[in-house]
Image (cartoon, rainbow, N blue to C red):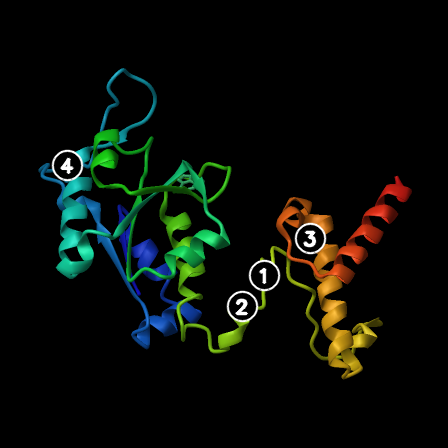
Amino acid sequence: MNFYVMTLFPDMVARGLNESIIGRATEKGLLSITAVDIRDFSEDKHKRVDDYPYGGGAGMVMAPGPVVRTCEYVKGLIPEERREKVKVIYLTPQGEVFTQKKAEEWAKEEDLIFLCGHYEGIDERALDMVVTDRVSAGDYVLTGGELPAMMMIDAVSRLVPGVLNNEVSAEFESFQDNLLEYPQYTRPEDYNGCRVPEVLLSGHHANIEKWRREQSILRTLNARPDLLEHAVLSKSEQKFLQELLQRQEEGK
Ligand code: ADE
């Protein structure tokens, strides 16, 4: 899978994605990450890419020319037959909030282009010309789109076959069936008097699976009850949830 990031800070993106699992997957040729400097496409003699906003107001706006030219250059790196359908994703708090579902959808693509804004944003005409999707990292404002782009590239990359060593681990994790992940433990069995839950030492796989599912339900109820509305639960798990809710009600 090929990622392209249009940014004023290409080193930040390249360095940030050069380590660990994503770095290794890039070395193996499973991923490619190309950070392209928007400033290289400025036609100003001082390489300026921003200007004052029409109508006044605080801050500067990224001018349309360098952004559109960068995008044309990046599209030129993509084989012609794939160019038409490639998504150009603009990172902005005004976009649709990124989710695991979106990561799964994007993991099916061969190429993704990210556009990172800075200052007060990018001239709307450039956005209208090049952007296909506007996506937010969450309901908070950052100084630029680089961290959200890196975060999204990470989330998508780990779904690309071969990127995780353990093929199954991307399936059995948070948000599977809309539930949060159960707690994990490793050695020692007793850490400063805190013991690993006995069921995990029992070797009884069915009991372990049941305990993990119940822990997932409990965690989701406590931390993200909004997810439970779309959770996929068996009959006995629904009963377990009802009991938890009843206990919660009684505790009030
Ligand atoms: N740029 C600044 N804040 C952002 C956010 N929350 N999501 C995506 N891009 C951003």
Image quadrant occupied by the C terminus:
top right
The residue at the point 9 percent across, 38 percent down is 45
Q: Are marks 2 and 1 in contact (CB under 8 Å)?
A: yes
**Helix or strand or loop: what does disc 2 sit on?**
loop
Q: Position of residue 247 (x, y in %)?
A: 87, 48
Say above or below: 20 vs 128. Answer: below
> Which residue matches tag 2?
171
Closer to the chain start, of discs 2 and 4, is: 4
Query: Is disc 2 surrounded by few (<14), some (14 to 19) or many (20+) residues within 10 Å?
Result: few
Q: Amino acid at mark 3?
A: Thr
Considering only order in the chain, which callout, 1 or 2, is on the residue closer to the N terminus?
2
Residue tagged 1: 176
| Element on which disc 1 rests | loop
Which residue occupies 40% across, 72% down? 161
Does any atom of ligand 1 lie closer than 8 Å to the CB of label 4?
Answer: no
Q: CA distance from mark 4 to mark 1?
A: 43 Å
Can you identify the residue that label 4 sits on? 65
Which tag, 4 or 1, sits closer to the chain's start? 4
Q: Amino acid at mark 1?
A: Gln
CA–CA distance between discs 4 and 3?
Answer: 47 Å
The quadrant where ligand 1 appears is top left
Disc 2 vs disc 4: which is toward the camera? Answer: 2
Left-right relation of 181 to 87: right
Residue 194 point in image, percent of width and height: 82, 70
Q: Position of residue 78 (x, y in %)?
A: 18, 59
Residue at horizontal 75 percent and vertical 62 percent from the top: 214
Tags 2 and 4 touching, CB below 8 Å: no
Residue bearing mark 3: 220
Q: Amino acid at mark 4?
A: Gly
As helix, strand or loop, the secondary structure at mark 3 comes to helix
Mark 3 vs mark 1, CA separation in Å: 12 Å
